[in-house]
Amino acid sequence: MTTLQDPKRYPKAKLADLYQLHWEAAEVNLRHLKTTLGMELLAAKTPEMVRKDLWVHLLAYNLLRSLMLQTNKYTTVKTPRLSLQGTRQQFNQFRPELVSAKASERQPLYHALLTSAGTLIVPLRPHRCEPRVVKRRPKPYPRMQQPRSVLKAKLVA
């Protein structure tokens, strides 16, 4: 359903492309944010800390996306085809060197970071369909069902 009713100005194919972009932005990028940046489970206990945690993750996400956008200077690959996870991994590899480098050494290192991130391309999968299921790896330990102090006392006894 749309309010864009003029078929000459808004052809069906263009509306379908727009919907696809919307879906990718809302679904795919949100999934990247949650999975790649480790937001599936938030450890915060208070609403204030949850908000801070979300803002930090959004900041990190925007940093990675801006790095991906800047790789356009060094590659012909369009930004949506670049790997968010690969960019994160490359950034983590270069981060210690960038922090400890002298000012004159930072620009070549940054250039190398953008060049290497620009080589990590996500393959085209136009009709890929994935099931929506929870995939949590089981832990070899039982769930905590008693207060920590009680369990500690049992360990000592």
Image: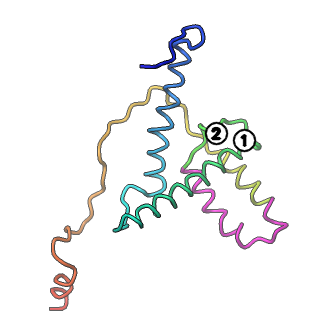
Is residue 37 located in the magenta-colored stretch of the structure? no
The crowd level at tag 2 (other Cα within 10 Å; few <14, some 14-19, many 20+) is some
Q: Nearer the viewer, residue 97 or 103?
A: 103
Residue type (three-letter) at the residue carrying disc 1: Asn
Q: Position of residue 10 (x, y in %)?
A: 56, 14
Question: Residue 146, relative to residue 63: is it above or below?
Answer: below
Res 40 quadrant in image: bottom left
Tell me, what colour scheme is on the image? Answer: rainbow
Between residues 35 and 9, which one lies in front from this camera angle? 9
Magenta span: 85-107
Q: Which mark is residue 109?
A: none
Q: Which residue lies most toward the right here?
A: 104
Report if the CB atoms under discs 1 and 2 are less than 8 Å apart. Answer: yes
- 10 displayed left or right of 48: right
Residue 131 percent across, percent down from the top left: 32, 36
Looking at numbered disc 2 in the image, what kind of residue is underneath it? Answer: Thr
In-image side of 36 versus 106 (left or right): left
Quarter of the image for the C terminus: give it. bottom left
Residue at left offset 32%, top offset 39%: 132
Alpha-carbon span between mark 1 and mark 2: 7 Å
Above or below, 85 against 79 in this view is: below
Q: Considering the image in quadrants, where does the N terminus appear?
A: top left
- Which residue is labeled 1 in the image? 72
The residue labelled by disc 2 is 79
- Which of the 4 quarters of the picture holds residue 153? bottom left
Is residue 102 located in the magenta-colored stretch of the structure? yes
**Picture coordinates of residue 78, whole percent (x, y):** 66, 35
Tell me where residue 9 appears, x and y as whole percent: 60, 12
Instruction: Please tell me which of labels 1 and 2 falls first in the chain.
Output: 1
